[in-house]
Each structure stands twice: as structure tokens, then as C-alpha cells.
Image (spheres, rainbow, N blue to C red):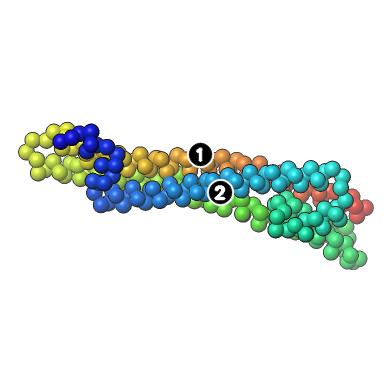
Amino acid sequence: MNVTTDLSILSLVANASLPVKGVMLLLAAVSFMSWYWIFRKSFAIRDARARTDQFERDFWSGGNLNALYQSAVNDRHSAGALERIFEAGYGEFTKLRDQKSLDPASIVDGARRAMRATYQREMDLLEAHLAFLASVGSVSPYVGLFGTVWGIMNAFRGLANVSSATLAHVAPGIAEALVATAIGLFAAIPAVVAYNRFAHDIDRVSIRFESFMEEFSNILQRQLR
């Protein structure tokens, strides 16, 4: 037996039993999807922070609210999340302000509700597919462990037909089993790290959105006075 060739990674994968091959294929597919969403989510969060920074600079520079609102309406498809929150709040504010029967508290409360609804939609978009990364991180090691257990069982079952058991008889089966575990960890570790990082970044963006909504509500309330 050529031990070096037989115990190479490609050889172990090619000669693995059918259930173990299925486990490896599943984990490889999950890992590919995980990395796809890691890159997509990383770009999305970075873009959200950049657009939030830009809009905050424009807003707090003392520009006219009507001009900012018209800009947000005209560039709705390319606007950032915070700009859409502002658009929803100020648009509702201008509609309610024209109704003479409403008191200032009701007008501001209506604008705040409109911003809150848009805020929830934007946060739902930012948090999309985080649950997938969390599932990959928690389930993949157990799927790999299933392949490990199956491979070790096959290795020891094969010893029943051998009169003199040696390491050369059992090593390939155990090695292919450990490859399944390694692939499971390869899929799980990046997903867990990315999930924790993205959850932290989204929480920070969420705090910025909520702070803006409160400050903007105070500005609207002062305008009505």
C-alpha cells in the first residue's frame, strides 16, 4: 500500500463511503453559500454605514429640510436607509401639519410612527440571512460529526473480515471520517465569526437610526411651537 497516496485528502474524499461523501458534499455546498452571504452582507453593511455618514453630514450641516426631503424623494432608489427614514417621517409630518384639527403632539407622534415603520423595514433588510449564518455555525459541526461517526463505524466493521488487524487497515476509514469533521469546522467557524461581527455592526447602525429618529422628532416638535 502506498500510504502517502492513499491518505491524501483527494484520495480520502474519492474513496469515502457514499453517506460520508453525501455529508462532505452537503457541507461544501453550505460553506459556499455561507461565504457568498458573508461577502454580500459585508458589502451591504459597509454601504449602509457610508450612506448613513453622508446623510448625517448633510442633515446636521444646517441644510433646509424641504430641500433634503425633495432630494430623498427624487433619489429614492439610491438613497440610504437613514435617508428613507427621514423621508417617511418628514413626509408624514407635512401631511399631518396641513390638518388643522390635529394638535402638535399628534402630528409629531404620527411622524415618529412613520419613521418607526420604515426603520423596521430597513433593519429587516440589514438582518436578512443572518439566521442562515447562525444555523450554519451551529449545525455544521454536528453534520460533520455524523460523517465522522459513520466513517469510524465502517472502519471498524471492515476489521471483522481481517484476520490480523493493523493500522494500515483502519487508518483510511478513520482518516476519511476526520476529513468530514474538518469540513464541518471549515463551514462553521467563518459563519460564527461573521454572524457575531455582523450582529455587532447592525446593532451599532440600529442605535444610530434610533438616535436620529428621537433627535429629528424633537426638531419637528420645536418647529410646531
Q: Residues within 10 Å of mark 1 (few under 14, many from 20)?
A: some
Q: Quadrant of residue 60?
A: top right
Q: Is 90 left or right of 127, judged from the image as shown?
A: right
The answer for how far apart the CA atoms under marks 2 and 1 are is: 15 Å
Which of the pair 198/80 is nearer the observer?
80
Can you see residue 61?
A: yes
- Disc marking residue 193: 1
Mark 2 and mark 1 residues within 8 Å of each other at the beta carbon: no
Above or below, comparing residue 66 to residue 170 in the picture:
below
- The residue positioned 20% from the left and 45% from the top of the image is 154
Percent x, y for residue 169? 15, 37
Can you see residue 111?
A: no
- Disc marking residue 40: 2
Looking at the rendered structure, the kind of residue marked 1 is Val
Closer to the chain start, of discs 2 and 1, is 2
- The residue positioned 33% from the left and 47% from the top of the image is 24
Quadrant where the image shows the N terminus? top left
- The residue positioned 89% from the left and 65% from the top of the image is 98
The residue at the far left in this view is 163
> What SS does tag 1 mark?
helix
- The residue positioned 35% from the left and 39% from the top of the image is 182
Percent x, y for residue 28? 39, 48
Label 2 vs label 1, nearer the camera: 2
Q: Is 17 left or right of 123, judged from the image as shown?
A: left
> What SS does tag 2 mark?
helix
